[in-house]
Image: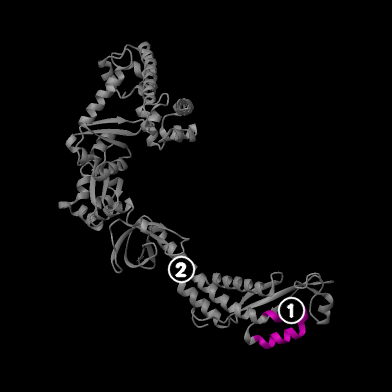
Amino acid sequence: MATMGATPTVDTSLGAILEQVAKEKGIDRKILVETIEAAILKAAQSVFGPTRELEARFNEDSGQVDLFQYMTVVEEVAEPEREISLADVEKHKLDATLGEELGFQVFWRPEDAEKAREQDKEFGDILKLKAGRTTFGRIAAQTAKQVLLQRVRDAERDLIFNEYKDRKGELIRGIVRRFEKGNNIIVDIGKTEGILPFREQTPRETYRPGDRIVAYVKDIDREARGPQVILSRSDPRLVEKLFEAEVPEIYEGIVRIVSVAREPGARSKIAVTSRDADVDPVGACVGMKGSRVQAVVQELRGEKIDIVPFDRDPARYVIAAIQPAEVHKVIVDEADGRMELVVPDEKLSLAIGRKGQNVRLAAQLTNWKLDIISESKFKQMEEEAIHALQQIDGVSESIAKSMYRLGFRALEEVSEASVEELAAIPGLGGAEVAERIKTQADTTMERLRQERIRAASMRTEPLTDRERLMFIRGVGDRTVGLLEEAGYKTVEDILREDEDRLAIRTGLGIKKARAIRQGARDFVESEQKVLEAGRADARRAAVAASAKQA
């Protein structure tokens, strides 16, 4: 066997081949020897039978793999492939006693044909090897080739993994080589190839073989059948690493990228801060005449980038993130992790962005849920909320405005508030009044619910999913909004969920979740009764009409 491509004959050249492979591929020669021995043994067991006691041993002097069969000396043979009788030992004048093992070399190579014939002549009735010798010789040669090739491939994969495993999370440069099934791109990255899966590509970016590419090393997959180095052009961390390469202050740790939000190929927002008061983090990232940020934009093929100063104050941070829109007012709901941003009517579309992109990226960047409201809409909502609060007996307009300023937007929020929270409202009148108002809020909510039910009974068209949710006792606009946001769009969605998950996903708490599920059950039962009554009325009407015709 002169080369790996040739069909090997396992002969004196095997030792030289092992030496060459070990040297060129960086594989321990001892591992190669053990691999060949194991492969030859497995092939021998498949040909001569798995019950034989066989051993494959590499002969360093000859450079060959020798095969041996061992048999135990017994008085009476029970397992012919593993035992030899004491009588046969004495007959053939073999040097062994009862209970000892005798080893027979199995001659299977072409150059050992004469030795094989002599062995079959003398021990053929005991060893029974003749039928398998020729077959085994062919299988052994092919096995040696396959095992060496596979071991080389495995070793190369191990070397690649060990070389690139520490480069995960870095930028890497390469050249596009070819395209594979599924629009995956194979990239030459030096000592190996990386794969840029279709899912990791940026929309609207196109490549041709020979194009140079910069990508983010997303993962090193040791078990992958193809290229092990997984690349990405869509990962937000690509933006971070590109800025790190362009901005020395980031590399040195003076400026830090706090967060990155990205819609690949369209727009990115990054939030930056500085540990040195004399270094402007935004200015450092922009560079002289925009040189640094433009270098990143160019690498991202025109993707727009907004650089935002990080602020520990959440409201100021969000205001910066929503730029270029201006914000006139911020209402913060820390419990729900939500902010309402009030913007001028003429700036509403700018704040929201094309297809909601600006507000979506700002929300991702700051990790806050953001609602953009125009000033006119906010004023309308404020008036409606104050009017709703005034429906509670004992709540005047001035108290309703105070409640609104303190974050009470709906009757259900008053109902769910503690007496202590309500008592803190200026001008309310203390704990006793607060408790009464809390009770009145419950009563008012139920009254309004009953009014909705009566109004619905007068309609001919079916209720919408949202209207059905609103009919659940104790559920108002705010709770419906939280339910819908958590994925509970219908009454049936609520009934299919258990109380614990409902509480966790909506953030409403277990007590409220339990009440909502019970309210949903009650609503469905009452709805069913109404439907049954309607069907009964329809049947009676049909009977009456039939009687008249008769």
How far across and down, in percent of the image, does residue 516 sit? 45, 27
Nearer to us: label 1 or label 2: 1
Q: Is residue 190 shown left or right of residue 377?
A: right
Task: Tell me the element at label 1.
Answer: loop
Identify the main secondary structure in magenta.
Answer: helix
Residue nearest the observer in this picture, 409 or 196 = 409
Range of residues picked out in magenta: 112-132
Image height of 125 relative to 339, above or below: below
Image height of 351 relative to 103, above or below: above
Residue under the image location 34 percent in, 34 percent down: 337
Residue 114 among those drawn in magenta:
yes
Local packing at callout 1 (Cα closer than 10 Å; few below 14, some 14-19, many 20+) is: some
Q: Is residue 368 shown left or right of residue 143?
A: left
Task: Tell me the element at label 2.
Answer: helix
Residue under the image location 19 percent in, 51 percent down: 287
Q: Which residue is mark 1?
A: 128
Picture quadrant of residue 541 = top left
Local packing at callout 2 (Cα closer than 10 Å; few below 14, some 14-19, many 20+) is: some
Q: Which residue is mark 2?
A: 156
